[in-house]
Image (spheres, helix red, strand yellow):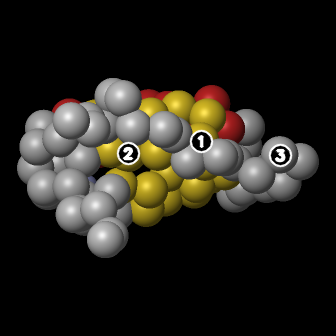
Amino acid sequence: MSTPITTAWPTDAVYRYLNLAGATIDVLQVPGTVPATALCGGCDWTTNHPQGPVWALRESAQRHADKCRALPRPASA
Ligand SMILES: [Zn+2]
């Protein structure tokens, strides 16, 4: 069985968090580009830090993970 913990991370994921319902929140950055983006796999929440380093999104992603209860989207067939 595949779980968010065992599922391969997206190519550009730097950090990954788990929300209260099992959806992942990925902090993504394409190497050499700004800004990094945080994206919830359960709801439509997303944010970025226009000029900051990728680690600046960790706190926002963690806060979202701590309160989001959106279920993970089903894997496409
Ligand atoms: Zn969410």
Ligand 1 under 8 Å from disc 3 Cβ:
no
Name the residue type under label 1.
Ala
Return the residue nearer the eye: 7 or 1. Answer: 1
Q: Residue at x 72, y 43 (%)?
A: 52
Q: Earlier in the sequence, mark 1 or mark 2?
A: 1
Q: Quadrant of the C terminus?
A: bottom left
- Residue 42, quarter of the rendered image: bottom left
Relative side of 7 to 57, left or right: left
Q: Position of residue 22 (x, y in %)?
A: 18, 41
Per the image, label 1 sits on a secondary structure element best described as strand
Relative to 12, does residue 39 appear above or below in the rendering?
A: below
- Inter-mark Cα distance, 3 to 2: 19 Å
Q: Quadrant of the N terminus?
A: top left
Name the residue type under label 3.
Pro
Relative side of 69 to 38, left or right: left
Residue that mark 3 sits on: 31
Per the image, label 2 sits on a secondary structure element best described as strand
Ligand 1 under 8 Å from disc 1 Cβ:
no
Q: Residue at x 51, y 40 (%)?
A: 9
Ligand 1 under 8 Å from disc 2 Cβ:
yes
Residue that mark 1 sits on: 13
